[in-house]
Amino acid sequence: MTMKIAFIGFGGVGQSLAKIMKERQENLNTVNGLDFSIVAVADMRLGAVYHPDGLNLDLLFEGISEHATVETYPEDHQTVKGWSSLETIRHSNADVIVEVTFTDVKTGEPAISHCRTAFAHGKSVVTTNKGPVALAYEELVQLAEDQGVFFGFEGTVMSGTPALRMPETTLAGNQITEIKGILNGTTNYMITEMEKGLSYNEALEKAQKLGYAEADPTSDVEGYDARYKVSILSSHVMRSPIPPYEVECEGISGLNLEKIKDAWKDGEKYRLIARVEKSSGSVKASVKPERIPMDDPLAGVTGATNAIVYECDLAGSIMLTGAGAGLTETGYSLLIDLIHYHKQRTPTKI
Ligand code: HSE
């Protein structure tokens, strides 16, 4: 059964996924049994186009690179142009919505409304937007379950590094008592640059130049970005929802070279540690700079790389490390979800 996909939002991440899928179309079909068709794109800047039989991706990208719009796409009697995001979700024949709009993480909008509308219309959603998952986890998971549809959000924590699915699938059967990690690339890059002798401001400027930090880096340096990720881990992996604003949070803006050198004297390094702990039924979550021993595996994580450690009662301590951002990596995280959605809806052959 061909999977019909609609992109709501078609910026860097969405385009990256579409390119990966175009390049690997044959492989996805033969190796994963995934036959797909991209039927719609609706984007605030690029406009919207829908064709029930699927869009030609070469023509779609041609329109974007030559005219900065998808609405120059050639028409026939079935082509529809100019639909809003909600119209595309409601009226297209897509079975799955790739939700990658520019969303305000503080309100989760418009992504939350897109997810609600998709579920209400019996459509599945895959997204990399943290806002809807951190702020409305229980509601959205319940809605998807009630409608018997799929809700995938692997890329919300550590992009294409499978921080959410690994504990759920590969580590299944363990009780996870603690999760701790380095979940923000910007701040880890800044700390390791400061360890090389740069000042806080020099390290921040470098992180901005390299595109790790946002133009307004507050969310990174004050720990808010990591706080959303901790909230998602707590809900999804620990099954204990904690709203982001209840996560104890301190960023790295109080950190300087002197403090870093002081820690070295005691054989320790600073890292911005995101942590969720479970003990006697209650769960505590925090994001703060912590001094950890030099030989702690997290102390060896440098630059913009992310890492996460799951304390498992049977498997012991398991660490996963990799990229936490990047267009290809984040586009790929959506592909992981789409492949799992495909597996879920395809009866197993014996
Ligand atoms: N600004 C984030 C980081 C991007 O530095 O990790 C991924 O959420």
Image (cartoon, rainbow, N blue to C red):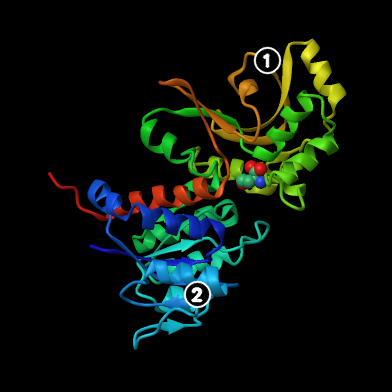
Q: CA distance from mark 1 to mark 2?
A: 53 Å
277 and 258: which is toward the camera: 258
Q: Nearer the viewer, residue 35 or 158?
A: 35
Mark earlier in primary sequence (1, 2): 2
Q: Is residue 201 visible?
A: yes
Name the quadrant of the N terminus: bottom left
Q: Residue at x 69, y 34 (%)?
A: 189
Residue 316's spot in the image, x, y percent?
46, 19
Check disc 2 and report the residue beneath it.
70
Question: Among all residues in the image, which is located at the extreme left?
Answer: 350
Q: Which residue is mark 1?
A: 293
Q: Is residue 208 above or below residue 67?
A: above
In the rendered image of this protein, does residue 237 appear above or below residue 89?
A: above
The answer to whether the residue bearing label 1 lies less than 8 angstroms from the nearest atom of ligand 1 is no
- State left or right for residue 60 relative to residue 106: left
What's the residue at 68%, 47% (across, down)?
211
Q: Residues within 10 Å of mark 1 (few under 14, many from 20)?
A: some
Counting from the top left corner in percent of width and height, residue 104 is at 66, 61
Tags 1 and 2 touching, CB below 8 Å: no
Splitting the image into 4 quarters, where does residue 146 fall? bottom left
- The residue that appears at 58% across and 20% down in the rendered structure is 297
Crowding at dot 2, Cα within 10 Å, few <14 / some 14-19 / many 20+, comes out as many
> What kind of residue is marked 1?
Pro
Quadrant field for ligand 1: top right
In percent of width and height, residue 147 lies at: 36, 64
Residue 151 point in image, percent of width and height: 42, 55
Q: Residue at x 44, y 68 (%)?
A: 118
